[in-house]
């Protein structure tokens, strides 16, 4: 089973595991996520109305208490999540950050195909090389049924075909929200876990008032460590009550 999981991820760039969490396992974290989100919406009303579809850095946020922050760390550090990371990135991974994804304020706002790596400032040639070795993984945990993510399987390691690159980069009259032939829709239910590579071509599917918690891990390399904001990591004291090697 262990080999199957890492083989599938290596081949396709994602893993969809249905009913990974019980309702009870989600209830406690959900209360904290909702509290964060309500406060975030109040504090970021303008940006939300101008198009934001996610928030981030929950574990360094002033919107939640120290106890709630520790609860989020415990959720991230739970055994069944650690085991999967260990299987997919046996060399060693590290926690990068958290995000919440929700629907845009403007219901007509278009989604957009992208690879996260396209926003790093690397040249296209560098990006083509980097995706062959680099790992950034989203663990997407939807709190309610959603249309999900559309992705292009195998593109975590392989570059775009022409239609895809032109769409993603708005070339030759194509728009980032245009449909792509190789797109595969992964619709998600509460309780599911979707692991996908941020390097692969993907887009969020808006609707159904989605509310989804993403935990992000990456390779533990000096290059990535420069991107990590360690305010989002547990303190030495907090680490004592956490049983994982991924912080
Ligand atoms: O869910 C979305 O809207 C997009 C998700 C995404 O692009 C990401 O997690 O990198």
Image: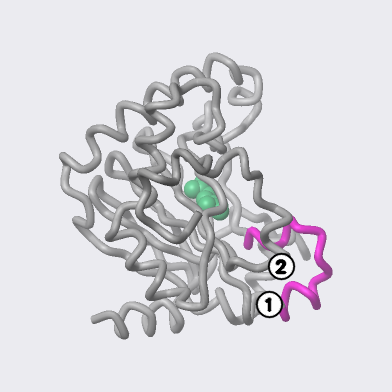
Where is residue 66 drawn, in percent x and y? 44, 26
Task: Give the label on residue 229, or none.
Answer: none
Q: Which residue is drawn at 17% across and 41% down?
A: 23
Looking at the image, residue 105 lies above or below residue 208? above
Stretch of the chain drawn in magenta: 115-129
Looking at the image, residue 158 lies above or below residue 223? below
> In the displayed structure, does residue 166 sit left or right of residue 186?
right
Q: Which residue is drawn at 44% across and 22% down?
A: 65
Disc 2 secondary structure class: helix
Does the magenta-highlighted stretch encompass residue 153? no
Residue 20 location, quadrant: bottom left
Contact (Cβ within 8 Å) of mark 1 with mark 2? yes
Residue 120 location, quadrant: bottom right
Where is residue 1 drawn, in percent x and y? 23, 81
Nearer to me, 145 or 226: 226
Residue indicated by mark 2: 166
Disc 1 secondary structure class: helix
Q: Which residue is drawn at 33% across and 45% down?
A: 75
Q: Which residue lies furthest to the top in this view?
A: 42
Residue indicated by mark 1: 162
Q: Main secondary structure of the magenta part?
A: helix
Q: Can residue 108 be spotted in the picture?
A: no
């Amino acid at each position: 089973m262990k080999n199957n999981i890492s083989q599938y991820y290596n081949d396709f760039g994602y893993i969809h595991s249905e009913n990974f969490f019980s309702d009870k396992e989600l209830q406690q974290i959900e209360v904290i996520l909702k509290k964060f989100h309500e406060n975030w919406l109040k504090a970021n009303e303008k940006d939300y109305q101008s198009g934001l579809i996610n928030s981030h850095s929950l574990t360094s946020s002033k919107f939640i208490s120290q106890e709630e922050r520790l609860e989020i760390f415990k959720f991230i550090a739970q055994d069944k999540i650690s085991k999967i990371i260990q299987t997919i990135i046996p060399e060693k991974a590290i926690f990068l950050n958290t995000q919440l994804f929700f629907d845009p304020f403007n219901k007509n706002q278009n989604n957009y195909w992208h690879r996260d790596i396209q926003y790093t400032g690397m040249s296209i040639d560098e990006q083509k090389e980097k995706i062959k070795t680099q790992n950034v993984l989203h663990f997407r945990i939807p709190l309610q049924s959603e249309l999900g993510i559309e992705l292009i399987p195998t593109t975590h390691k392989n570059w775009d075909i022409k239609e895809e690159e032109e769409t993603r980069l708005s070339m030759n009259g194509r728009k980032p929200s245009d449909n792509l032939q190789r797109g595969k829709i992964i619709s998600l239910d509460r309780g599911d876990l979707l692991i996908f590579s941020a390097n692969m071509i993907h887009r969020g599917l808006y609707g159904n008032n989605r509310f989804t918690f993403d935990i992000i891990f990456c390779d533990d390399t000096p290059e990535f460590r420069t991107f990590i904001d360690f305010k989002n990591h547990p303190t030495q004291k907090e680490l004592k009550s956490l049983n994982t090697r991924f912080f």
